[in-house]
Amino acid sequence: MAPGQYSMDAKQHTMSPVVTGATVIGMKYKDGVILAADTLASYGNEARYKDVCRLKKIGEYTLLGAGGEISDFQYLSNLLDELADEDWLHEDGCSMGPKEYSSYIGRVMYNRRSKFNPLYNQFVVVGKKQDQAPHLMYVDHQGTAFEEDFVATGFGMHLGIPLLRNNWRPDMSLDEAKALVTKCLEVCFYRDCKAYCKIQIGVCTGTTVEISPPTTINHFWGHGAWTERRLEETSDSTGTW
Amino acid sequence: MAGTGAGYDLSVTTFSPDGRVFQVEYAGKAVENSGTTLAICCKDGVVFAAEKFLLSKMLVPGTAKRIFPVHRRAGMSIAGMVADARQIVSRARSEATQYQNAYCEEVPPELLAERLGLFMHAYTLYWSVRPFGCAVLLGCVDEESKKPDLFCIEPNGMVYKYTATAEGKGKQAAKTEIEKVLANNPELTCEQALVHVAKIIHKVHDEKDKDFELEISWISPASNYQAGTGSEHEVTS
């Protein structure tokens, strides 16, 4: 259609993501809450951008992890930065915590889906404000929002959640928690073609919010079952699945 | 209407025969009646101070502020009518956010100062509005280079760039004092300047005036270059 012309058809919105992030794992542990994601932004099935940070610090106590459309995540990040600045300008000695920010994100997402123009993301919003209980919330592109002790987005919902169900305890130490989220992402990396071996872990302790520099997880592809030629063999061979 | 000038002070849309706009000059008078405020652009940041008259013994300390943050690395101290100046503060804040949204970076100090100059000047052009009865000192630190800047914007819309300046009742005395300080130590840091600005406000305070509260704020390494993060107030009586 020529520029300046209008279509007689209904208005079209983006209804499918283009550049996407995959799994985010979030869980509470003994002293706070932890969030982890790999650093890949895929273009369809192509591993397009390999060092994109999908975790974002909001305000003083909150962390946001994003799966789905990266540009929508960036857009929401700008909204949140502006909100945090506004909050700071009040100089009233109090600032918003994870509850306020996750609720805000939930409303933005629901509002956008109600306009049939959703932000194509699955978010995990975590945080701990001073002595308050750790907070963890899942928000998706339809505005569905719920609180949980542990949560995963994308393929991690299928590959990570079983591990979390079996191994998560409320009294986990930080090291145990880091090991568990790393394990989840490792499993995702082996099975999900949009996952990556470079990961970042964010930790909220109530006083600090830290996002680790990217680290590469160990991976090994030389298992016998994976290297053997199975196709020509007997009909009862099952492959690795 | 006897004598030149008489009758020409009712509107900003009419010049007097000798080329003055009296309403704008009267706005300047409103600034001169207020408590002193001063700011120094140091080597590593900007320090603000304001003398706030206590209208009542029951006024809660630390309230009715005269120094405000504009964005993370910019602050403003005001002289004159505080209610008028809050309008400028709020305009400065929205200019800063708009620039941030459009260009994904902090608004350059010069531009912010010029925009506020235009804003204040617009209120000297129409009969339906009155000029702002305040002057503001705008201090910024550049996001990347950490280079500090200080501007003064007056009711007539003029924007001046300073290394240090003062507005309000004691502005002449305060400026002389700051000059002395800077002459002895041109490479002043915010931390060193802090003591000086407090002393100067105390020195230029007129004993005949009411008791005052000293309000100080700084954008410096000590406040992680954040406006409003470092601030103090002291009640004297």
Image: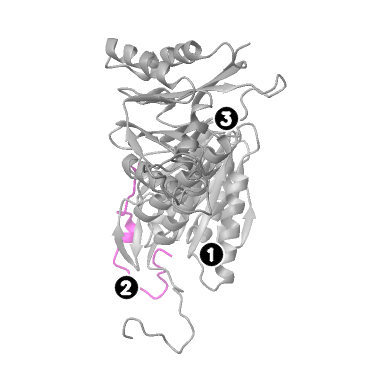
| Along the line of sight, the residue nearer the viewer: A212 or A174 | A212
| Image mark for residue A141 | 1
Could you tell me the amino acid type at mark 3?
Lys
Task: Read off the magenta span.
Answer: A214-241
Where is residue A100 shown, x and y percent of the image? 61, 47
- Residue with the mark numbered 2: A231
Could you tell me the amino acid type at mark 1?
His
As displayed, is residue B52 above or below residue B146? Answer: above
Whether label 1 touches label 3, CB < 8 Å: no
| Along the line of sight, the residue nearer the viewer: B3 or A204 | B3
Q: What's the distance in space between the residues labelled 1 and 3, CA to CA?
A: 43 Å
Could you tell me the amino acid type at mark 2?
Leu
Front disc: 3 or 2: 3
Which secondary structure is most common in the magenta stretch?
A: loop
Where is residue B227 shown, x and y percent of the image? 45, 32
| Image mark for residue B65 | 3
Callout 3: residue from which chain?
A: B
Secondary element at tag 2 = loop
Q: Quadrant of the C terminus of chain B?
A: top right
Whether label 3 touches label 2, CB < 8 Å: no
